[in-house]
Amino acid sequence: MIVVQLLINGIIAGSIYALVAVGFSLIYATNRFIHFAHGGFVTVSAYLIYLFFTLVGLNFYISALLTILIAGFLGWLVYKLVYAPLKKRKVSNAVLLIASVGLLILLENLMLLIFGADVKSVGYIQIRKGIEVFWGIITLLQIVIVILTVILLLILWFFMKKSRLGKIMRAVADNAELANIIGIDANKFCYLSFIIGTALAGVAGILVALEQNIEPVMGTGLIIKGFTGAIIGGVVSVPGSILGSYLLGLVENFGIWFLPSGYKDAIAFVLLFVFLLFKPTGILGLRGKDREQKL
Amino acid sequence: MAKTKKIILWLIVAIIVIGGIWYGVTKKPVEKGAIKIGFIGPLTGEAAIYGTSPKKGADLAIEEINAKGGINGKKLELIVEDSKCDPKEAVNAINKLVNVDKIKFIIGGMCSSETLAAAPTAESSKVIMISPVSTNYKVSQAGDYIFRTVPSDALQGKKAAELAYQKGFRKAAILYVSTNDYGLGLEKVFKEEFSKLGGTVVISEGYAAGDSDFRTQLTKIKFANPDVLFIPSQMPGNDLIVKQAKELGIGCQIIGTETMQDENFVKTVGKAADGIIFTSFAEYKGAQADAFSARFKAKFSEEKTIYSDYAYDAVYALEKAMTACKDVQDSVCVKTELYKTDFIGATGPVGFDENGDVKGKDFAVFKIENSQFVPYEK
């Protein structure tokens, strides 16, 4: 059944986009600027797991844990060194955006300089035929990726809606100055979102490294799709960005069933345009009016 | 605090300025009047392997020629431009080399799209380009000043089609890179030749260079039920296509191209690569080839990489033609001499036909066995 296989393909692609989108969207939700360098941190994490597991030869789970921890630390570091000083000067969001693009290029080229241009493979999983599920084929790793994404969706939804920390983060997201006035240290939560968001980039980096191999320029492609998924889903809503990524993956893969495969990116961006024109707040984003009421 | 910050900032600025000046000074030609040779190829980006590998071959040849005293007493110097496998960048690179550096001879471009994009500028400014990588069939007609040391894909596509047909396959599928001339050219030639022989191409799917998800193309291919899958693609791309094809349970024979003759390909794909057959440059077994391999290993402490020997021979072809001219910078004379080239290089006899294509070179068939490339026996 070709339909089932395409559905599976779409879900796998969507999960990978979602892994990237979720950290990006978490950072956007609290900081309100577009952190493109998030894709760069996915790349760095992919190389970290390659370094620890393949080059140094540590146990895979220890390598993965180290990668996620270091990614989280790097998130803190980049906020401290780049964004916090810029924000202190009250620069516009455009400046922060440009800084993040610069950072993305810097990170990719650093990886190119250190590890070279050729494709690297973690080599943790042997290539073999996947498992047949309902007339379609999926590999074990892909199942792990999909399940992990769904778990992340649930945890983050719960975290943002129900937990105290999540509520504060949303308060900061809605109005940082107001949050400051009532005694919330907004700056602290900006740091926190960078740590958690970039640790999530670490998770994405590990799984993408296993699924797609590693090359220095992989981050740009990933963040473009992750960003598109986040916008479609409603970028301020973390669960929304996951849903948007799934929608993107499915539409892309079903689109090229009928259209030539070269139109894949075109399909993705047509979907983005449709959303920007007719529902600019995305699937789960709040409309202007609703937001005012909520505030 | 602010003061220390300012000092640090000024220090960084000073280091960059001094570093820049130092770099500029040390980069000056070894000797006044050195003959500059341009190099256009991807050194960064995802296709970097197609630039870094030939660059090593060119570096080695230039080092040897300079050690012997250069050409008519003048040393050679390589001016390298990174074109990222992008035709726009290749045009920028050739404009810079021709207008700023006043260069008359270029090794490159590497990706076929680069060579085809830069060729009109080279042709109109009488600059000689020798490509050691571009195999697209259109390069033959790119101009009088455009040469190449690798054989054309008109031959490679034919070889692959014949191979598929001889093995008894009648229904072929193609998955090709559709955003550059390499994939487009091979897809066209294979389709024509395979149909001419009596086979049918049941499905032909393209993808954009840089893609990493080929599952839907492969799903469509799987449901078209071909006997053989031809993949004119490149690295990275080959690795993920083969991985995802195996994962989706596509069991038919896979035929690849010379881009699979890449250590990284077998390293990343592992056992799943075994059994793949691919067309690549016929190996030349001669003293010159062995000597090149030994010298390459001594200089870079790795086995010779694909295309590096073709770049090495390209530099020597230039050297021989330049030596024959009274004025080494006279590109019209060097061009005429290049058409008369006849020497044995690391890739065997080197000579050019009236299109600037290398003469007498062909493709051979290889098989991957236990992650090794072995000549394919029928």
Image (cartoon, coloured by chain):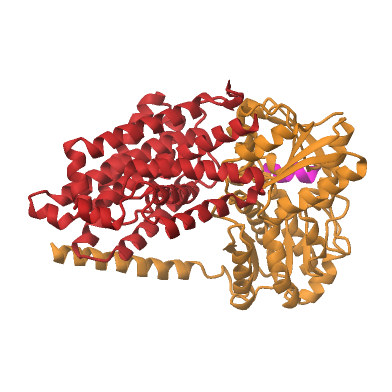
Q: Position of residue A194 (x, y in %)?
A: 27, 46
Q: Position of residue B330 (x, y in %)?
A: 76, 77
Q: B105 and B187: which one is in front?
A: B187
Is B289 inside the magenta-drawn segment? yes
Q: Residue at x 17, y 55 (%)?
A: A176
Residue B362 visible, this orientation: no
Colour-to-chain, red:
A
Q: B29 and A167: which one is in front?
A: A167
Q: Position of residue B378 (x, y in %)?
A: 87, 28
In the rendered image, which quarter is residue B23 located in? bottom left
Chain B shade? orange
Q: B342 and A201: which one is in front?
A: A201
Is B177 inside the magenta-drawn segment? no
Q: Is residue B235 left or right of residue A64?
A: right
Decide: is B278 above or below A57. Answer: below
Q: Quadrant of the N terminus of chain B?
A: bottom left
Q: Position of residue B195 (x, y in %)?
A: 88, 44
Q: Main secondary structure of the magenta part?
A: helix
Decide: is B216 above or below B325. Answer: above
Decide: is B75 above or below A232. Answer: below
Q: Residue at x 26, y 53 (%)?
A: A290
Q: Which residues are magenta?
A: B284-294
Q: Is residue A229 left or right of residue B211?
A: left
Instruction: Tell me how many marks there are.
Output: 0
Q: Is residue A118 left or right of residue A276?
A: right
